[in-house]
Amino acid sequence: MTLKLGVGLGIAGVIVLFGVIGPLVVGNPSTVRDMGLTGPGNGFLLGTTQTGQDVFAQLAYATRGSLIIGVVVGALTLLLSSFFGIVGAFVGGWADEAFSLFTNIMLVIPGLPLVILISSYVPNKSIWLVAAVLAITSWAGSARVLRGFTLSVRSRDYVLAAKISGEKRWRILFVEILPNLIPLLASQVVFAVIFAILGEAGLSFLGLGASGSFTWGTMLFYAQNGLALRLGAWWWFAPPGLAIALFGAALSLINFSIDEIINPKLRSQTRAERNKWSVKA
Amino acid sequence: MSVLEMRDVVMEYRLREGLRTTRLRAVDKVSFELPPGRTIALVGQSGSGKSTIAKLLMQLERPTSGSILVDGEPMQYRGARAAAYRKAVQMVFQDPFGSLNPYHTIGHHLARPVKLHHPDFSREQVADRVAELLRRVRLDEDYVGRKPHELSGGQRQRVAIARALAPEPAILVADEPVSMLDVSIRLGVLNLLAALQREENLGVLYITHDLATARHFSDEIMVLYHGAVVEHGPADDVILNPQHEYTQLLAEAAPAPERRLAELGH
């Protein structure tokens, strides 16, 4: 385990634990108190909002909300991109052409206008709807990557050898090809989770996110509406902002580590390590 | 199932360049007969259609015209006869680094064809058969749990040969089985193939561009040039008395110390 992977897993682990356990121990994040905007202290770890709501409690619920979005979008992206990327490339012929065309069409559909369109039809968007929209607009890129890699693996000799020995097609796909795609799938999923959390934060900040639920993005949206920045209420906007930045960084570190496992050439060497192998005159 | 025969087999690929399509004739009316216990060497330069013939025999491609016969009956692509054919004709690939799945152990590579060939085998019987196959190719039984990347090129090629032998085939297609190996271990792998052929009375199609090993290990040599067989005959005749100019060129290109010494003597 490299330092990169350790740090990434550490930060991500702490945030996930907070999102899972936090909401069980904090109070109701929506409770309005008659105390206005107060800084950290006085029984409120991260102070209160303009309407006296506990920021720490909100952060706990927001972490859970954002993680749910990330996990749901990650899972949906995995399903959609593997189906359209791997199955299409494996079957080949017209199926590949059709799946490829569909992937390309989905690739150019912009997410933001689609969400605006959907939000004008659905007044009360649940967190699941937002996750579904994000997944539908984000799977196409990784489907293309998977398709390319599957095309390369499909024509390798060990797949031909399995075909020659009379293996069933589904067995060739699941036993011979898929295991070689696992590192790539893992890195695609991690990327999809980052994209989903950042995308949801962006949408929520614009006021297009899920209504009536807490995410890091909605916290920032309310902080912005409450003029937190102008009032100097750093305890209101800094925690969700930091959480987004830290979680994104942690997942990126994990992603880089996976990349290095797939392709050892990406491992950065120190100059001293490189020089060890050079021939001294 | 014993005699494999190709009769006037033609394989054409369609190449697309924009709207125009052109046809590339990779295999041009090739006919030969491969009885059990015989080795035929298929010699030719890169792009002469050697590997396409291997693909046709492995049912990875379908011929444009002509027929592939097994004991006089046309080869089937579906159904029970196709399954029987696949067991009877096996292949050793050129690249031992690409022909084994890096994700799976050596045991998996050998156990799968055994299970496919004997669906009724118990776990112990499959393990016994895998160990026997490893012994046949002169590898230790403890290689079962190893991954391909832990093996050398020669060892991998032995595993590939063991895999090809697993369904107890009658015919083996060896597509340049030693061209990717170190010169020092080529002879070992070729001797192994020759020994296995004698033990099992296999018909072997030895695809190569090395005339010396073709002469040493085969009964007949077929010379392929631009997809067509330009010369076919007993190994020694083809090498010592080449008729077609391409074969003459090929024979002269091979290093011959005697000839060189004779030239120096003058």
Image: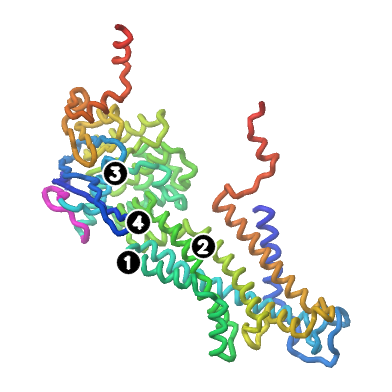
Residue range of the region highlighted in magenta in the rendering: B66-79
Label 2 to label 3: alpha-carbon separation: 33 Å
Residue A235 shown left or right of residue A161 in the figure: right
Both labels 2 and 3 in a single chain: no
Callout 4 touching callout 2 (CB < 8 Å): no
Callout 4, which amino acid? Ser
Return the x and y of residue B226 as percentages of the image width and height.
24, 40
Q: Tell me the number on the disc at residue B79.
A: none
Q: Tell me the number on the disc at residue B122.
A: 4
Q: Name the residue nearer the viewer: A171 or A144.
A: A144
Q: Tell me the number on the disc at residue A185.
A: 2
Q: Residues within 10 Å of mark 1 (few under 14, many from 20)?
A: few
* Chain ID, mark 1: A
Residue assigned mark 1: A94
* Chain ID, mark 3: B
Callout 2 touching callout 3 (CB < 8 Å): no
Return the x and y of residue B253 as percentages of the image width and height.
30, 25
Label 4 to label 3: alpha-carbon separation: 37 Å
Q: Name the residue nearer the viewer: B149 or A230.
A: A230
